[in-house]
Amino acid sequence: MNICVVGLQWGDEGKGKIVDILAENSDIVVRYGGGSNAGHTVVIGDERFALHLLPSGSVRPNVVCVIANAVVVDPEVLIQEIDGLALRGISLDGRLFISENAHVVLDYHKREDQLREESLGKQKIGTTIRGIGPCYADKVGRSYAIRMSDFRNLDQLNEKLRTILEYKNKLFSALYGAQPMSLDVIAANCKTYAQRLVPFVTDTTELLHEAIGAGKSVLFEGAQGSLLDLDHGTFPYVTSSNSSSLGLPSGCGVPARMVDKYIGVVKAYTTRVGAGPFPTEQDNETGQYIRERGHEYGTTTGRPRRCGWFDAVAAAYSIKIGSVDSVALLHLDTLTGLKELNICKAYEIDGKQTTFFPANIDRLAKARPIYERLPGWQEELGEAKTFEDLPVAARSYLRRIEQVIGKPVEMIGVGPRRTQTIMKED
């Protein structure tokens, strides 16, 4: 079976944990989009792995890992992750494959990202300053793009870099009064990157089609969340890629029809990082309670996440556009201790009620959430092994979410570890 795991909210849903669990029965795990701005966390026993570019299945030693075409690769970060796993006894030799067509994030992208964000003042969009947007912009512009295949010919790469830096430095100076960046430093870094990463570079589209043709099981891993999708999210407060499952076919060259099941991941509440409309946000004691119990601080940036009630309107929208079959709901344990819970089942916009999420931020900013109140519970959930082990109120909360979003919740997270996951279905 080929499976896609995708976030249904504004990212940070816990996709890493679900991918890690499903990777046990997968031959290949594919990261199909995004860059090092993603932060996927896997907890095994007392060990915590924070991954940004490597697929979450990389912590399982027998799984083949693929970084596909639409990922923008920061070679410095990727090498750090490879070395970090090696120090913990996990080797990627012979099982990591990077698309030769994946674009490369270099220091001038990060510098451009920083200068642009600083220049926006109060209009900042909340970028992670990882150079993701500028790299995707160069990809679309084509003339100043560097891809992983370019590392195979350093002389040719240096000539490309010379042209690019000449342009970038003029841009930085004219628009921001910034000092020029050194071609020699960037070229030297690229030589180091090439020495380490070229052995992993290949045609991953061919690799994946051969694997699927041979009956291998492939697990596709989305980055960020569907509401951050460049085309279908809350633009401009989005990421620079198609982070919903709609990005899978173009991201790795595998048609959507070859995926047997789409699993959407949500938290038992809603969070987002940075600016942008957030109808169910609780900027109060409740939000702070969720933030502290759920350790809601960014894996990549460390920024505190905005927290609010579960938004079924938003989740149902992501399910629709992503053809999602079932849901993994995580962080249910975070809600322990709250006397009352709320589920947003509809919005009121300009006096009219709707259950369809408006991705346009002008309309979303006007949305008033219509809540359904349910009782909370006081019991800790970390030791629950089955659905029946959960308190009655927790079971009622889950059943109501299923009804409102229209899809079954098949996996329930009651803690950060692999073992703290309840499987409702096989």
Image: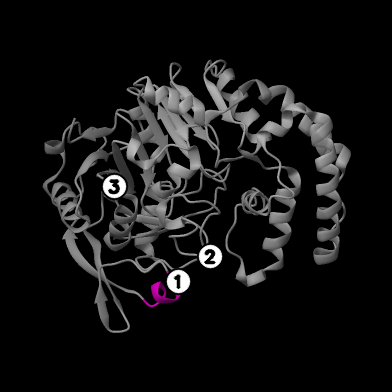
Residue in front for this viewpoint, 203 or 341:
203
10 over 371 or under it: above or below: above
Query: Mark 1 highlights which residue?
Result: 361
Question: Which residue type carries mark 1?
Answer: Ile
Badge 2: few (under 14), some or many (20 or more) residues near its Cα, within 10 Å? some
Badge 1: few (under 14), some or many (20 or more) residues near its Cα, within 10 Å? some
What residue is drawn where x is 45% and y is 76%?
Answer: 362
What residue is drawn where x is 65% and y is 38%?
Answer: 74
Residue 148 location in percent, x, y? 66, 33
- Distance from disc 1 to disc 2, alpha carbons, whole Å, reads 8 Å
Question: Which residue type carries mark 3?
Answer: Val
Query: Mark 3 highlights which residue?
Result: 324
Q: Which residues are magenta?
A: 360-366
220 over 241 or under it: above or below: above
Residue in front for this viewpoint, 150 or 227:
150
First in residue order: circle 3 vs circle 2 = 2
Figure quadrant of residue 257: top left
Q: Which mark, by number, is residue 236?
A: 2
What residue is drawn where x is 54% and y is 52%?
Answer: 303
Cβ atoms under marks 1 and 2 closer than 8 Å: yes
All told, the count of numbered labels is 3
